[in-house]
């Protein structure tokens, strides 16, 4: 089947979950594998995002003749506008012959009808090419030739660890050459090695040297082997660069706390149009300098945006945001979408879902799991549940703020998963704080404890960061202790609902309550050490 497009054509390309976007048909990149689908596809470069992907031909349209069809009628997002400007410049720079091609092309039948208007209808159709038809009857199956005898298999190339030597090849290389055999029968590689060994042994005096196995690398006495150096993984790992096509929907974001601030920055960096609101007006001004639009009230943000996100500290703050004066619920109307990313209980999420859907709005819960650094770096884990269509519409936003997104099904599953994760995290940090306190009491160096942990299977960034914070009594907040204690309480309530004993979590919760009572509620979660270090 002939392709409608060729390399260099300017097109509109539409991928699942995204609007049609200006692009160009280019030669495929070898590192991007073509999907196995048999439908015609083209490799498209997307203007503005500098990204590329395989797109079905049925979702690809010539740019010039379909511009009016795919251009947004309302306000055009910044990223989309830049893409259109770039493709328009490319169109202007094209030769006249290429410009003419950017119009819709006639089909083969239409061209033949133009050339031969008197041709009968029967002769206009293409003749069937029987030379390409498959032969009828049974086809003989070809036996696959065995590459290895006696069930031998080639072993994969070994991975060398620091300090290890390359393995010596045995089998055929170690076997002695039988009488009468000639050198020409040896593989070329082993022949060269053998000649090198003969040359080296001939130049040495004294008794004959030991027989050397072929394939063993020769060591030079002049250049001693250098000791291996291990580089910490955190110095070699790099955060992957994200190429995101932002949604044309107008985004609202309510709550610019520790987590919300990082998420909004990443939404703006990826080209999304964002309107923000926070109880403290000064924070809105800071984000206005980064390109965000300030909103006066939550209700105003909902009315001016298509999808509204929220991230607040606790269930009480979320209920006040939604049900309070000039709150979210007052601005909800058919077509509006609300996504909450706070860590709250299932009951609160269920109540808000019912209120939003009763006004014909859409609701999705999407609590996030991660630290302040993960929020700033766009490396959060998103735990979504609820309206699946809304989840698909939010994918570009989730990609901007997180490294992985999970869709967990019905409403409430996101809150349940978030509380279970928080419970595990809280008990681990509480256990570390008791270990640090005990080491100090019995006269051990706490730094030695952390170093030994880093050499074991318990090695992780959590133990390193929180352990050194405890040792240095430095509690600059990355995750508030009072929020962690709130999550511990909610997870215990979740356990009570299903009669699940949580003895360890209950004991850890008491430690967080004690540290909070001592005035460390607004400090980092590592301050739970102050409850253990008596």
Image (cartoon, rainbow, N blue to C red):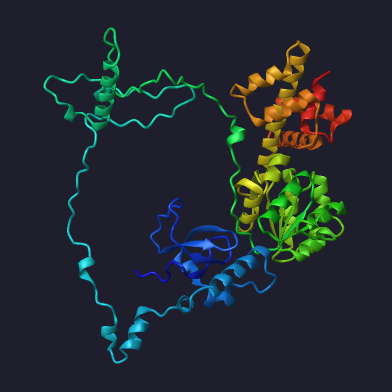
The image quadrant of residue 339 is bottom right
Residue located 55% across and 70% down the image: 90
Say left or right for 155 vs 455.
Answer: left
Quarter placement of the N terminus: bottom left
Q: Position of residue 387 (x, y in %)?
A: 64, 55
Say left or right for 277 vs 46.
Answer: right
Q: Position of residue 411 (x, y in %)?
A: 66, 49
The image quadrant of residue 91 is bottom right
Determine if residue 510 is in view: no
Residue located 57% across and 58% down the image: 50
Say left or right for 195 vs 83.
Answer: left
Quarter placement of the C terminus: top right
Determine if residue 78 is in view: yes
Residue located 77% across and 15% down the image: 440
Q: Nearer the viewer, residue 229 or 117?
A: 229
Residue at the farthest top position:
207
Q: Does residue 181 lie above or below 377 as drawn?
A: above
Say left or right for 149 vs 328.
Answer: left
Q: Nearer the viewer, residue 378 or 183?
A: 183
């Amino acid at each position: 089947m002939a392709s409608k497009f060729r390399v260099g054509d300017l097109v509109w390309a539409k991928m699942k979950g995204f609007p049609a976007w200006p692009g160009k048909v280019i030669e495929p990149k070898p590192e991007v594998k073509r999907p196995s689908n048999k439908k015609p596809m083209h490799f498209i470069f997307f203007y503005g995002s500098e990204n590329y992907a395989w797109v079905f031909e049925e979702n690809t349209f010539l740019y010039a003749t379909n511009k009016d069809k795919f251009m947004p009628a309302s306000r055009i997002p910044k990223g989309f506008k830049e893409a259109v400007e770039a493709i328009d410049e490319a169109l202007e720079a094209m030769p006249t012959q290429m410009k003419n091609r950017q119009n819709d092309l006639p089909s083969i039948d239409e061209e033949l009808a133009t050339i031969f208007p008197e041709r009968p209808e029967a002769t206009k159709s293409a003749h069937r090419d029987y030379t390409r038809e498959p032969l009828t009857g049974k086809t003989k199956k070809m036996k696959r030739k065995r590459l290895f005898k006696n069930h031998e298999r080639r072993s994969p190339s070994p991975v060398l660890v620091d300090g290890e030597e390359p393995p010596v090849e045995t089998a055929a290389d170690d076997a002695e050459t039988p009488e009468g055999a000639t050198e020409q029968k040896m593989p070329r590689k082993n022949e060269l090695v053998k000649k090198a060994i003969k040359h080296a042994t001939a130049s040495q005096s004294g008794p004959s040297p030991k027989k050397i196995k072929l394939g063993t690398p020769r060591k030079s006495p002049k250049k001693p082997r250098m000791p291996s150096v291990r580089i910490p993984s955190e110095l070699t790992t790099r955060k992957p660069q994200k190429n995101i096509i932002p949604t044309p929907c107008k985004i609202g974001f309510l709550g610019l706390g520790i987590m919300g601030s990082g998420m909004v920055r990443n939404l703006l960096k990826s080209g999304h149009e964002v309107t923000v609101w926070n109880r403290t007006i000064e924070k809105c001004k800071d984000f206005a300098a980064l390109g965000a639009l300030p909103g006066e009230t939550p209700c105003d943000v909902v009315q001016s945006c298509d999808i509204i996100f929220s991230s607040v500290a606790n269930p009480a703050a979320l209920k006040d945001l939604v049900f309070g004066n000039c709150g979210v619920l007052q601005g909800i109307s058919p077509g509006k979408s609300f996504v909450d990313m706070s860590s709250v209980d299932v009951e609160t999420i269920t109540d808000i879902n019912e209120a939003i859907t009763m006004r014909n709005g859409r609701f999705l819960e999407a609590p996030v799991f991660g630290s302040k650094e993960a929020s700033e770096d766009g490396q959060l884990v998103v735990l979504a549940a609820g309206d699946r269509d809304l989840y698909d519409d939010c994918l570009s936003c989730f990609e901007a703020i997180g490294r992985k997104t999970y869709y967990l099904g019905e409403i409430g599953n996101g809150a349940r998963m978030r509380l279970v994760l928080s419970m595990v995290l809280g008990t681990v940090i509480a256990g570390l704080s008791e270990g640090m306190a005990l080491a100090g009491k019995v006269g051990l160096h706490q730094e030695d404890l952390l170093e030994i942990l880093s050499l074991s299977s318990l090695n992780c960034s959590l133990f390193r960061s929180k352990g050194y914070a405890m040792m240095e009594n430095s509690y600059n907040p990355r995750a508030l202790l009072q929020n962690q204690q709130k999550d511990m309480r909610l997870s215990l309530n979740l356990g009570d609902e299903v009669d699940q004993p949580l003895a360890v979590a209950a004991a850890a919760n008491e430690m967080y309550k004690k540290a909070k009572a001592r005035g460390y509620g607004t400090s980092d979660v590592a301050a739970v050490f102050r409850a253990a270090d008596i």
